[in-house]
Image (cartoon, rainbow, N blue to C red):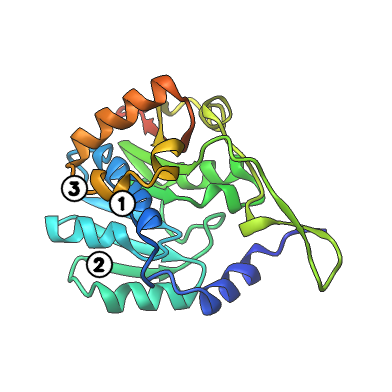
Amino acid sequence: MTFDYKTHYELDATHFDYFEARLPVVAHSERRLAEWILSVVPKNAKSVLDVGCGRAWVAQALCPKGIEVCSMDISPTNVEKALSRYPFNNHKGIVGDAFNLPFEDESFDCVIASEVIEHVPDPEAFVKSLFRVVKKGGALIISTPYKEKLRYELCVHCHRLTPANAHLHSFDERRLTNLYRENDLETVKWWAFNNKALLFLRTYILLQFLPFGAWKLIDKAVNLIFNKPVNIVVAYQKKSLAF
């Protein structure tokens, strides 16, 4: 059966409020993921496309810095909420499909797709589509759960096994870094982090007060002992010159 992702995520946005308050441990984990992504956004980026914008944290973080942010989602509901919550002059919104982006080639200095790729039917086509709109010298930044063990549940309607949370794929660094190998790719870098033990032991009660740099050192040290990161971020950089 083919996954109708368009209908699924249009309905998803009407039933799930991406802006609602999170449990403290979830909020801490999402905060550290966002901080990591923001730390690898090119320093000279002036325009960013946020694909699958969800709660629009990209616009919240970058618009006050003068960066143009376009929040894009396949759901009109998410885009409307994003613009309403963060009504900056340099914040735009558009309803669109990541596999058929409504933009010209090389339109953005940076494209971010956080926790999206595990949901899409064709990860390679997804990356190729996003990389097309990255400007020369710019970057595509993707995050996803790291080596996630996919779970399936029996649907009460169709009686078929259905992936929990609509996660269709699991990724490690090898699979992610090999999704795109065209001639316009300069480099690929990846980082795995957000140690599972630290989250399970509720250390956020103390670690939430640490700045990102200090937390990062602790997380790295614990991963050396107990190598169970929750997230992975990969950055594909496009060549600056024509190839």
Query: Does residue 132 sit above or below 171 in this rendering?
Result: below
Please give the residue where the numbered disc 1 appears in the rendered image.
Answer: 31
What is the x, y in percent for residue 153?
A: 75, 58
Viewer can see residue 182: yes
Q: Residue at x 37, y 43 (%)?
A: 134
Q: Quadrant of residue 237?
A: top left
The type of residue carrying mark 2 is His
Q: Residue at x 22, y 57 (%)?
A: 61
Q: Residue furthest right?
A: 159
Of the two numbered discs 1 and 3 on the same chain, state the one appearing first in sequence.
1
Q: With 44 as the anchor, is 122 left or right in this view? A: right
The type of residue carrying mark 3 is Phe
What is the x, y in percent for residue 33?
A: 35, 45
Q: With 101 as the anchor, is 25 left or right in this view? A: left
Please give the residue where the numbered disc 3 appears in the rendered image.
Answer: 209
The answer to the question of whether label 1 and label 3 lie on touching residues, with beta carbons closer than 8 A, is no
Of the two numbered discs 2 and 3 on the same chain, state the one appearing first in sequence.
2
Q: CA distance from mark 2 to mark 1?
A: 21 Å
Q: Residue at x 49, y 31 (%)?
A: 228
Query: Does residue 187 sit above or below 23 in this rendering?
Result: above
